[in-house]
Image (cartoon, rainbow, N blue to C red):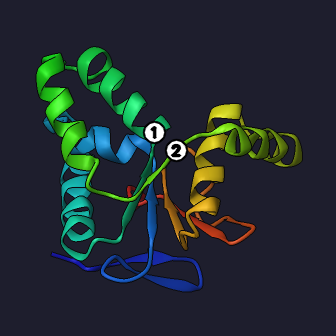
Amino acid sequence: MAQRGRFPGKEINYTRGKFFIDTNLLVYAYDSSAGNKWRTSLEILSLLWTHRTGVLSTQVLQELFVSLTQKVKNPIPSKTAKEIISDFLHWPLIVNDGKNILNAIDIQIKYHFSFWDSLILQAALVSKCEFLLSEDFQDGQVIESVSIANPFLE
């Protein structure tokens, strides 16, 4: 299992540092129909679990529940999704409080991302993560102190 990934000008070592995880990475880990994305997600999440380097937000867990129970090719029962989310509550969790919402609006205004992506970025910033693992942002982009990495690119 590879413990490192690529990033323009940087090497990603999933065993050290802090990695904010966007919803898509979690969804793929529970959707075997996602093929290579499923395998990649499982590998990365395994490393993040083992080394305790992953960070999530309330938004990510809410989106995960909806995606697993309603949006994936083979939805899972709500009770199973609840158990998955319960397990992820052992990770550091950023709560989207009023201050984070207002800061996300500032990010949205400054960078022209969607509000929901801005809220993800705000959670990564407030948690002081070095990387945001997502396929929804431009791979290789550095926004303030967070480097964006799409782990699904070849």
Q: Which mark is residue 20?
A: none
Mark 2, other Cα within 10 Å: few <14 / some 14–19 / many ≥20: few
- When the figure is inspected, residue 86 is found, relative to residue 122, above or below; the finding is above
- State the residue at coordinates (58%, 40%): 96
Badge 2 marks a residue whose secondary structure is: loop
- Residue 62 is situated, as x and y percent measured from the top left of the image, at 40, 29
Mark 1, other Cα within 10 Å: few <14 / some 14–19 / many ≥20: some
Badge 1 marks a residue whose secondary structure is: helix
**How many discs mark residues in the rendered view?**
2
- State the residue at coordinates (31%, 44%): 26
- When the figure is inspected, residue 24 is found, relative to residue 8, above or below; the finding is above
Q: Which residue is mark 1?
A: 58
- Residue 115 is situated, as x and y percent measured from the top left of the image, at 70, 33
Q: Is residue 76 visible?
A: no
Relative depth, front residue between 34 and 97: 97
In which image quadrant can residue 33 be found?
Answer: top left
Most distant residue in the right direction: 110
- Residue 39 is situated, as x and y percent measured from the top left of the image, at 18, 54
Disc 2/disc 1 C-alpha distance (Å): 5 Å
Q: Which residue is mark 2?
A: 95
Q: Amino acid at mark 2?
A: Val
Which image quarter holds the N terminus? bottom left
Q: Amino acid at mark 1?
A: Thr
Taking the image as shown, residue 128 lies to the left or right of residue 145, namely left
Relative depth, front residue between 121 and 152: 121
- When the figure is inspected, residue 149 is found, relative to residue 27, above or below; the finding is below
In which image quadrant can residue 48 be found?
Answer: bottom left
Asked if marks 2 and 1 touch (Cβ < 8 Å), the reply is: yes
Relative depth, front residue between 16 and 141: 16
Who comes first in sequence, dot 2 or dot 1? 1
